[in-house]
Amino acid sequence: MIITIKYFGLIAEVTSQEEETIDFSGNTIADIINFLNSKYPDLKNKDFQVAQNQELISEKTKITGQEIALLPPFSGG
C-alpha cells in the first residue's frame, strides 16, 4: 500500500524532509516505526506521537489510512 508520511518539528529535522511517500507492506504502526527507525537511526532517540488520518493512535493500531504523521511532543501554555 502507498502511504504518505508527514514529519513535523524535530522529526522533520532528523529525516531532513517534511513528507515522503513509500510503498509499505506492514500491518501495524509498530511495523512502520521499525521501518523508519532503520531508515533514520537518529529517530530512535526522539519522542513522538503518531497520527493516522489526523487521529492520534498507538503502535498496536492497524494501518488503515494513506496518511501517517509523526508529531514531536507538544508544549502548551
Image: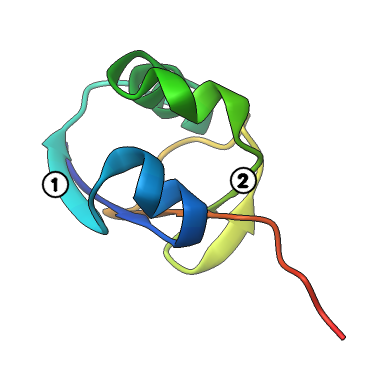
On-image quarter of the N terminus:
top left
47 or 56: nearer the viewer = 47
Q: Disc 1 designates what residue?
A: 21
Looking at the image, is 18 positioned above or below residue 23?
A: below
3 or 43: nearer the viewer = 43
Which badge, 2 or 1, comes first in the chain's sequence?
A: 1
Is 13 situated left or right of 61 in this image? left
Looking at the image, is 37 positioned above or below residue 29?
A: above
Which kind of residue does numbered mark 2 sit on?
Phe
Tell me, yes or no, whether the two marked residues, 2 and 1, touch with CB atoms within 8 Å.
Answer: no
- What percent of the width, then of the height, locates residue 75? 77, 71
**Helix or strand or loop: what does disc 2 sit on?**
loop
Mark 1 closeness class: few <14, some 14–19, many ≥20 residues within 10 Å: few
Which kind of residue does numbered mark 1 sit on?
Thr
- What percent of the width, then of the height, locates residue 53? 42, 64
* Residue drawn at 62 percent across, 45 percent down: 48
- What percent of the width, then of the height, locates residue 35? 34, 19
